[in-house]
Structure formats: C-alpha cells, structure tokens
C-alpha cells in the first residue's frame, strides 16, 4: 500500500497563559478531577509563562524528520496534530483531506504500549476520521519503538553526558534512576493481552531502562515514576521520583543521574517534576544530581521516525533490542492485538 503523508500525533500543550485552563480541562474531561487540582497544575504552566514547550519541540522534530526524508529522496509531506490542544488532530485530518491525502502513516510521540501511550492514539485517529467523515484519509499508526536501537543509543549518550556533569569524586558511586509517567495500577495491569500477562507499559519501561543501563555500564539502577495526577485513594505506579531520592539518601547514595526514559522531549512534566522538584529535593539532601536529555532533539530520533516509515512501507526488518513485546500498527483505530491495552480510562502523558 502506498501512503501520501505522515501525521505526527502528540499530546498538545498551551502556548499562552489564557490557554492553560482550557487545555487542562480538555486533558481531564470526563475524569472528575477537582478544580483545585487543575489550578495546582496550572501554576506549573504559569511558572513558565503559561507556555508548554511540547508544541515547539514537536515542530523541531517535524523539521528534522522533513530534512531526513528529503535526504533519503522520500517525498512525504508531514502534518502535525494534537489530542488536547491546537493544532487539534480533527482539524489537521480535515486539512489533510482537503489537500487530497488518501492515506497516511501516523507517528505518535509515545514509544509505549498501554492505554494513553498507544490505544488512546488509535482512539484519536478514529475520532478525527469520524469528525471529517467519508472523505477522511486512511490513517495507520506506526509501531511502538521503546527498544529501537536508535532510541536506546540516544538515551545512552545522554546518560553518559549527564554523568560527566557529576563531580569527578562522586562519579564511580553514582546511581542511575530512570523515570516515566505514572499511571493507575489498574491501567497498567490492563495494558497488554491477558495471555501475555498484562502490565505491558511498566514492563516496556523497565526493559528500556535495563537496555540503557547495560549500554552505559550502570550495575545499579532504578525504575521510578513521576507526574501522577489522580486522587490519593487510587493506587498509581510507585515509587515517586522525589520519594525515591529520599529513600536513596537514607541508604547512603549521594549522587544520581536521572534519565526521563518515558519521555520523547523535554515536556513541562520533565522540566517541572525533574528540573525543579526532583533537583531541589536532591540539593536539600546534599545529593549530586544530573538529568539526562530526552532524545527528541537528537538527530537519531528523526532517523528513527524515517526508519519506522521505511520498515512499514517496504516490509523491512524490525529492529529491536529487547524481549518485552511490542505490537505493530493497525488501521482505523483498532487495537494492535485482541485484548491489548483494553483499559480505556487512565490518564498519563505522551
């Protein structure tokens, strides 16, 4: 099958202060999140002038992908749409239809399985096509890429660079801490086909962390979580990064490299939860702290996108480093495998 375009599909974020609350209301619609919690999160955005970096970072990724496509002689226009803020995916798919696009591949800015990392993108695709109607292009989501060699290599180099920022006398005892967006435990249990044991999301995160630790020579590393947003009575994946730093300090660890393994780019949750809250906690504990960069700005990330496109169009080999399942693309919003990621209401970031 031939394709006319690529759609980069992401989470979205506000780009001015007056957008912040409407954006958060979009994110939490139907979840019963108290207004006080929205106002608390809004303060994080307003701390940075009401602008999330995510849209601009995605535009940078798109520019790099366009350059990589051009270098390979691939003529494939790239469109940009979001789940929660402008450019909304419904508007983008409408524009694609008006431009005569009949079929397009979809690259999500999430490497993972699970509801919000995978199935919700299929739902976004189905919703956008339904909004456009009979003239909507066919949209095919590319596969999960959490253990792609280029993804792991970019993170590994970022970890090495972060370690170089640790004082020399502490480097040999530095601990690697890999962090990803927390989700409700029930959502994690429900991610992945039951026959495969569920917990697809947390297993994929743990596998990516293992691969990065092995690539960088860290014998000691941890997988922790951040950015939970649900009510306290609902169990979410733990431990939280800030709580974990306190625990490590109590065990005598005085130096950490933190790798935001769950994030493609320096989203607001990375710069707030890690560069503010976690780094401040580390300073309070007298702990050396260095945060690894995310891979979105690395040239290898654009090459990864183009490689996934070629893999799908040409039927080439699937390059993976890990052994935890990852599922392929499907059409028209259907889940990859029967029963995969069946939990349909669990909040998490892209």
Image (cartoon, helix red, strand yellow):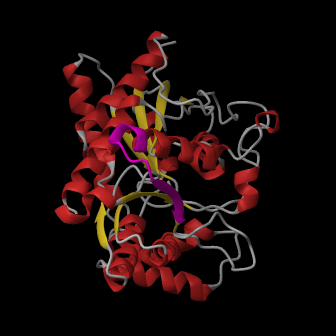
- At horizontal 44% and vertical 10% (from top left) the residue drawn is 314
- At horizontal 81% and vertical 39% (from top left) the residue drawn is 194
Q: Nearer the viewer, residue 313 or 1?
A: 313
Q: Find out whether residue 283 is within the magenta segment.
A: no
Residue 304: percent from left, percent from top: 36, 30
Q: Count the marks.
A: 0
Magenta region, residue range: 213-225
Q: Nearer the viewer, residue 221 or 115?
A: 221
User: Where is 186 relative to 230, above or below?
Assistant: above
User: In the displayed image of the protein, which residue is found farthest to the right?
Assistant: 195
Residue 255: percent from left, percent from top: 33, 67
Residue 193 visible to an observer of this rendering? yes
As drawn, is 328 to the left or to the right of 52?
right
Q: Nearer the viewer, residue 280 or 123?
A: 280
User: Where is 348 relative to 288, above or below?
Assistant: above
Residue 342: percent from left, percent from top: 76, 45
Residue 258 visible to an observer of this rendering? no
Dividing the picture into quadrants, the one containing residue 87 is: bottom left
As drawn, is 164 to the left or to the right of 280?
left
User: Where is 321 relative to 174, above or below?
Assistant: above
User: Where is 121 relative to 337, above or below?
Assistant: below
User: In the displayed image of the protein, which residue is found farthest to the bottom?
Assistant: 36
Q: Find out whether residue 223 is within the magenta segment.
A: yes
Residue 230: percent from left, percent from top: 65, 74
Dividing the picture into quadrants, the one containing residue 166 is: bottom left
């Amino acid at each position: 099958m031939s394709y006319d375009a690529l759609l980069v599909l992401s989470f979205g974020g506000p780009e001015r202060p007056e957008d912040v609350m409407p954006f958060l209301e979009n994110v939490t619609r139907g979840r019963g999140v108290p207004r006080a919690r929205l106002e608390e999160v809004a303060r994080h955005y307003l701390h940075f002038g009401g602008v999330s970096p995510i849209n601009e970072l995605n535009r940078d990724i798109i520019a790099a992908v366009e350059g990589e496509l051009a270098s390979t002689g691939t003529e494939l226009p790239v469109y940009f749409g979001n789940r929660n803020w402008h450019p909304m995916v419904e508007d983008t798919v409408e524009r694609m239809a008006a431009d005569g696009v009949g079929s397009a591949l979809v690259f999500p800015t999430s490497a993972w399985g699970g509801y919000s990392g995978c199935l919700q993108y299929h739902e976004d695709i189905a919703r956008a096509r339904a909004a456009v109607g009979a003239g909507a292009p066919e949209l095919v989501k590319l596969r999960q890429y959490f253990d792609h060699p280029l993804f792991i290599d970019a993170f590994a180099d970022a970890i090495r660079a972060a370690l170089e920022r640790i004082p020399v006398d502490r480097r040999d005892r530095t601990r690697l801490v890999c962090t990803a967006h927390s989700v409700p435990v029930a959502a994690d249990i429900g991610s992945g086909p039951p026959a495969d044991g569920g917990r697809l999301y947390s297993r994929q995160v743990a596998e990516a962390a293992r691969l990065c630790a092995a690539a960088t020579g860290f014998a000691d590393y941890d997988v922790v979580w951040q950015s939970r947003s649900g009510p306290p009575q609902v169990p979410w994946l733990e431990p939280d990064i800030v709580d974990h730093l306190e625990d490590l300090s109590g065990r005598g660890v005085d130096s950490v490299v933190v790798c935001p393994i769950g994030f493609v780019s320096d989203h607001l949750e990375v710069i707030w939860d890690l560069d503010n809250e976690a780094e401040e906690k580390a300073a309070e504990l007298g702990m050396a702290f260095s945060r690894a960069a995310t891979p979105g700005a690395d040239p290898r990330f654009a090459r990864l996108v183009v490689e996934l496109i070629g893999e799908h169009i040409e039927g080439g080999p699937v390059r993976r480093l890990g052994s935890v399942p990852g599922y392929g693309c499907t059409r028209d919003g259907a889940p990859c495998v029967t029963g995969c990621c069946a939990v349909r209401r669990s909040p998490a970031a892209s």
